[in-house]
Image (tube, rainbow, N blue to C red):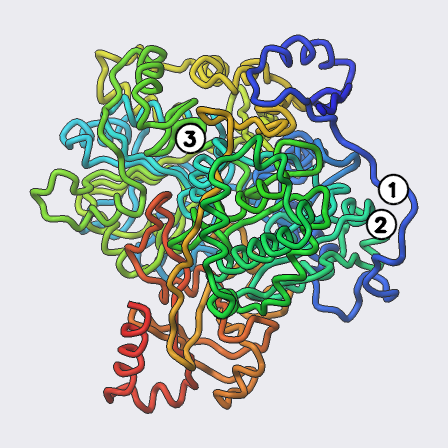
Amino acid sequence: MVHQHSSLTVPFNKMNCKRFLRYRERVSVMGKTKHQGPVKLPKMPDPKHWVSMVPFGLGKVKPKHIRDTAKVVWENKDNLPYATRILTQGVCDGCALGVAGLKDQTLAGPHICTTRLNVLRLNTMPAIDKSILHQDISELRKRSSSELRQLGRIPYPLSRKPGESKFSRISWDEALDRIAGKLKTVDPKQLAFFLTARGITNESYYAAGKVARFLGTNHIDNASRICHSPSKTALKRSLGIGASSCNYQDWLGTDVLVFWGSVASNNQPVSTKYMYAAKRKGTKIIVINPYWEPSMANYWIPSVPDSALFGTKLADDVYQVNIGGDIAFMNGVMKHWFEMEKEHPGSAINRNFINEHTHGFSELKKHVEAQDWLTLETSSGLTKSRMREFAELLAGSESGVFVWSMGLTQHRFGTDNISQVANLAMLKGFIGREKCGVMPIRGHSGVQGSGEMGADPFSLPGGDFDSSKTRKRIEKTWGFKIPDWQGDIVGVSLENAVLPENHPRKLRAFYTSGGNFLETMPDPDFVKKCLESVDLRVHQDIILNTSTLVDAKEEVIVLPAMTRYEQPGGGTSTSTERMVYFSPEIKGPRMEEARPEWEIYTEVAKRVKPEQAHLIDFPDAQTIRNEIAEAHSVYDGIQHLKEKGDVFQWGGAWLCEDGECPTPDGKGNLLPIELPELRKPEGHFYVTTRRGKQFNSMVYSATDPNNSADRYDVLLHKEDANQLSLKEGEAVVVYNQFGTFHGRVRFANTRRGNIQVYWPEGNVLIPKGVYEKYAGIPEYNTAVVVEKAETYHAHKDTKYVEKRIEELETEIG
């Protein structure tokens, strides 16, 4: 049954009601039901969900929201009116929940979080002092990215060539002419573009994707490559979709809400308000993660009075899988279901949904039943009985929402992880209806739209790059031929910089909008070598970071970009739940010479091919939105977004509504997933990276507010530490064949045999060049040795360390 809602998909007010009613019906969607708009929280508190009667969590390890807010106010004291307008009028440039002003489409009432407050200063700070900006590069290199960020905004174009010890100021014409001049001389296969996600709008992504193809290259990538690229790949092959099938509102009152490898409370703090609302409606919250994250257990939600006072108990249970053990765990759950079905048909899975809306059930069942429990227990790290508990919980649930993040995607088998989640959802029929769905929760405000706009080597607006039908359609819209060769992911593009001089794909020009690969990619030393090996690097950004200071063979050019709040004509961004929000230009101070990102791309392109400039010219942001609506059918409606509060949702409330998937035959695909190889020698550990108080690679505190850990702490189970005769706070060395990490022991409730280090500091341990075969995401997990620092250094001049590494290579190689 289709649930029809009478409310609009936009904030209801008299000013915009009629206009949105007119265009809402023209949007091409995959579902029929419209989002009902924000709902209200219960008025009366429920003490059974409280953490403690001690007010404000005094004495507990938790984020200090009041203190942090006061700190943000102080940081922005020189620009408070503008900062206030950004918060109350603009769409959040932090995570991808889609808060517009202080409101969203999930819950009524004001929403604000420390993630948004932490990045606020990027929009309000003044220009870098010229005496610092033009000091010797060796002095700038002494600063961390956090310290560079605090210097202020990039005020005007800069240049630095080999042998020059300082940045020189150049004009926009000089900068654009130099870039265009170089691009005219390189083969398009030797040019690559990259766009980060924080604050970048759909308009910029679209312009960049079009410009790249106009210049003849398909080497264009975005920040989703190292976060949710496997989510898109897996959901496409399993369900025919490339985004969340449901809404945040579906969390509220679903029988079970599962967070898989996701610490939403830390990375998307406003989501804790949704969890609170879900708990109040009786939802069970389950966490599946190697580390029992304190902030997913208990959280003090500042915008909910009783939670701010007494805290809220969030998760009802946690299943601590091994790092990389999720596939085995899910196979174990399915194996239990099939056994339950033999005893009592219809007791575990939704046979009607399976028969009517899926393929591959028999093959999946045969594959799972053939697996033995010992292997599943060893790989997952969980017992057969624990897997049975989770299987029974899901079996008894009429609805469920599965949410995941980097804990599932950042593996060499990330796509398989997500297809396993889709398998569970389809077997239960948790697809295409209210309070059900699969949701890759996004961590950046702009990243959902990046691939959808075509800023991706595998995508064009409205379709896949490898579809000749899509290419022909876009060529007709754009008026020029699109190169038909497959572009590279950004990791491969960077590696191509160190290819031989005569190689046809040797990277010679690299144009990056934001991003810092020294702090986001494995093996930072190798990445630095790659960056240094490029002839021309263009850094289009609002601030400096450590990668901006790396030499290039011919020249580094730095271009000052506007923030989304400064761009004339405003801009749009797409949230996790496919809401397309309009963020208006906000009155306030402007950077000296900063320009809109989309405009810079087109100006470069017009200088490279002046005879075809008319094909790439966008006079304003509205023109881009008009073309997006033409090029991408589900974005028909974006052209009408013009004022504060304007929003629409592409695809309707639920993708695959009523079980109908946008696949050739309308059915989902159940896929048998093989267990990955997860071998490690006895006494060695699996390691993964985690986030503290940070936004992507931008670190805001040396201490994790959720567990008091330091950035160089190694999170280790107490019993594992005891076996190694390690005490808390003791210096240790974590190492493998890829690198060495010096830290200190911190006892934590991790799955035994698994440790965690902070990202990006721990990237030295991660192997370079290991990419997931379907989506190209780098592997961010590996096996390591953990030893007392004194033991390691006592043997560093012997063959001891080499032997320990050889053990790892023998077992996992």
- Which amino acid is tagged 1? Pro
Mark 1 Cα-neighbour bin, 10 Å: few <14, some 14–19, many ≥20: few
Q: Quadrant of residue 431?
A: top right
Depth check: give the residue in front, 450 or 549: 450
Location of residue 607 in the rendering, given as x and y in whole percent from the top left corner = 25, 20
- For the question of whether residue 811 can be seen, the reply is yes
Q: Is residue 497 left or right of residue 500?
A: right
Label count reads 3
Amino acid, disc 3: Glu
Q: Is residue 150 visible?
A: no
**Residue beneath disc 3:** 593
Looking at marks 1 and 3 on the same chain, the residue that comes earlier in the sequence is marked by: 1
Q: Find numbered disc 1 in the image and state the secondary structure of the residue it sits on.
A: loop
Q: Which residue matches tag 2? A: 305
Residue 42 is labelled as: 1
**Label 3 vs label 2, nearer the camera:** 2
For disc 2, the neighbor class at 10 Å (few under 14, some 14 to 19, many from 20) is few
The residues bearing labels 3 and 2 have C-alpha atoms spaced at a distance of 44 Å
Give the mark, 3 or 2, whose residue is nearer the N terminus.
2
| Residue type marked 2 | Pro
* Quadrant, the C terminus: bottom left
Check the image and name the residue furthest to the right. Answer: 44
Q: Residue at x 63, y 45 (%)?
A: 349
Of the two numbered discs 1 and 3 in the rendering, the one whose residue sits closer to the viewer: 1
Distance from label 1 to label 3 (Cα)? 49 Å
Residue 627 vertical placement versus 432 (above, below): above
Circles 1 and 3: CB atoms closer than 8 Å = no
Estimate the x, y position of residue 495 in percent, counting from the top left: 23, 49
